[in-house]
Amino acid sequence: MQTSTSWRSFRMAAWLGWVIESNWTDPFLFAVYSIVKPLSGAAILVIMYGVITEGNFGSALFPYIYLGNAFYIYVGAVMTGVSWAVVDDRELYKTLKYMYIAPINIPLYLLGRGGARFVVGSIAVLITILTGVFFLNVKINLAEVNWGLFFVSLTIGIIMLALIGLMLAGFTLVTARHEGFIGEAVAAALYIFSGAVFPLDVLPEWLRPVGYFMPTTYWLELLRRSLVGEVANAFPTLSQFSNLEILGVMIGLSILFGLVSIWIFKICDHIARENGMIDRTTNY
Amino acid sequence: MSTLAIETKDLGRIYKLRGNKKEARKELIALQDVNLTVKKGELFGLLGPNGAGKTTLIKILTTLLSPTSGWAKVAGADVLREPDLVRPRINMVSGGESSGYGLLTVRENLWMFSQFYGVPSKEANERIEALLEMIGMKDRMHTKSSDLSTGLRQKMNIVRGFLTEPEVLFLDEPTLGLDVGAMRDVRKFVLEWLRANKERTLLLTTHYMMEAEELCDRVAIINKGRVLACDTPTALKQRLQKDAIFEIQTSPLNGLSQQMLVDQPEVTKAAITETETGTKLNLSLVEESALARVINLFTQKDVKVMNLIKREPTLEDVFIDLVGRSMAEEEDSGQPE
Ligand SMILES: Nc1ncnc2c1ncn2[C@@H]1O[C@H](COP(=O)(O)OP(=O)(O)OP(=O)(O)O)[C@@H](O)[C@H]1O
Ligand SMILES: [Mg+2]
């Protein structure tokens, strides 16, 4: 009973999320969101890199930041995908209260809704990486890729991001509409602390611990190491740790963040019920 | 197994209002000491003006909102402590809003919700067809819900509530905002469904007197968060049977006040409603002879009588009897403090 409730919550939510996300009745809009936006983000980075390093695209730093930026697309996509479902269902579709009274597992429902963003996000990540490989000299030697490490890290990371998204969904539940962009906002704030586009060593010393505390830091490091091992190893930040050690740290931090997120969601959910916020729509 | 579908004990809800910085935090009593019991198989009505607390009560009974005092049981389980036992057995529909996923067709919207309740897919599709047929929109089954009119969207939402065959179904103003034809469809649908499902319980809120009178086995009249009376429509009206009730349409009242009318001997109740065509008075008189005094008063104030009928009491009169004002007046007087 319990598992079937959880499973159908997740499965139906993923189906619904996919129908909404893949609404490509307007292929132009779809192209803008999943191709143009990530590519222009990458382009800005490439141009800035080119200017600062006077065109030194052969340096190991370039694939490091290019891949970091590409995978970082997942952070915003997955976290927002989960938390935005609250805003969508409450304000736009006016269905959140009907979901809440249904015999479903609400956290799994929200995670399912985020699943669709993961798929769309994957398209953007893939396109960005392929662009790098074919046009920008980002060298990925397929024979040397550590696929096992890649998929394990990717999976754990996505689950971790989805759970953080759940925490943001909790905040969204107890706040007003404009805070629905909280996912993108948090993603942007974490960008500098995750070693996405520069090694953590660049940060002032007193800020570095924030980066070391973020599971995203280790997640990006593992993805880079699995795809372009020798390049990633060239960076001092985590060079004294082995892949396995980093994986261990990432799993530990992911469990910690995941548990805290679920706990915070439960508290917010309780507050929402106490204050009648589940069906509250914003009046302008 | 208990025969009660809904039971509340001293149920209360206070909202904390976030005032602006200058004012202190205010509290609003939305529900107070509500004690209700609804039997299995009943069609129970909650009748009250805007802000009476009807939606608040439904939100508590459907586990969406915690009460601040008392407790409530629905389908045998406590809504606060055992929501997971309540939810599979209930469903809820609020009228006057268009909900649903515009990208999905009517069938897809309904099917998705049935899946959340674990209804086997094939059976769900059969139910969807049958219910859409009953409510008169089977031809729109494959229309995207964004392409439906507001009224049809509301009908779809109503079908969503019945689709999961809940033991207890809550309908919050199901006919709000519908045109006369659609209202009739919905009422007919509700009655037909209950006839076919005698074990099912339905709690309906409305501020249409006629709707409560026509549909409900029992009605609770609620105002400012309190249940003032609860009985069958017939029994409620019988309280007033001793009075003679007159409905009088007049020209403008020229300063004649409600107080002046009730001050007349043997006039027990007077309610004044301004309508588009003039003024409407509802008078309850102990003796018909008191009418003469009222007419006399009109003459003094130069008020003309356009129309005068004596009629059977309605729930509207019951409301006036309990509250001292008509429901329309109560709504105009604004939100309770
Ligand atoms: N979330 C909330 N926060 C603060 N006050 C609220 C909230 N929800 C409702 N109220 C107030 O509680 C009172 C009862 O509201 P409720 O919606 O239950 O009335 P109702 O009988 O359903 O009215 P209507 O016929 O307008 O739907 C009203 O005064 C309303 O303003
Ligand atoms: Mg209401």
Image (spheres, grey):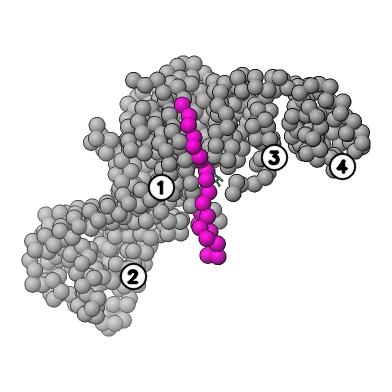
Label 2, secondary structure: give it: helix
Q: Chain of mark 3?
A: B
Query: How far apart in space, not on screen, are marks 2 and 1 (Cα)?
Result: 47 Å
Q: Which residue is mark 1?
A: A274
Residue ID at (15%, 74%): A237
Q: Is residue B102 magenta?
A: no
Q: Which residue is mark 2?
A: A43
Question: Ligand 1 within 8 A of label 4's CB?
Answer: no
Q: Earlier in the sequence, mark 4 or mark 3?
A: 4
Residue ID at (22%, 53%): A259
Q: Of the residues shown, which amino acid type is indicated by label 3?
A: Glu
Label 4, secondary structure: give it: loop
Question: Share a chain, discs 3 and 1?
Answer: no
Image quadrant in which the N terminus of chain B is located = top left
Place of residue B317 in the rendered image (x, y in percent of width and height, measured from the top left)? 68, 28
Residue ID at (92%, 36%): B300
Q: Which residue is mark 4?
A: B254
Q: Is residue B75 visible?
A: yes
User: Quick check: B244 left or right of B116?
Assistant: right
Q: Of the residues shown, which amino acid type is indicated by label 2?
A: Ala
Q: Chain of mark 2?
A: A
Q: Which residues are magenta?
A: B17-37
Residue B195: mark: none
Task: Please state which of residues A273 and B243 is positioned toward the viewer in this rendering.
Answer: B243
Query: How far apart in space, not on screen, are marks 2 and 4 (Cα)?
Result: 78 Å
Residue ID at (59%, 49%): B337
Residue B329: mark: 3
Task: Please state which of residues A14 and A258 is positioned toward the viewer in this rendering.
Answer: A258
Query: How far apart in space, not on screen, are marks 4 and 1 (Cα)?
Result: 50 Å
Query: How far apart in space, not on screen, are marks 3 and 1 (Cα)?
Result: 32 Å
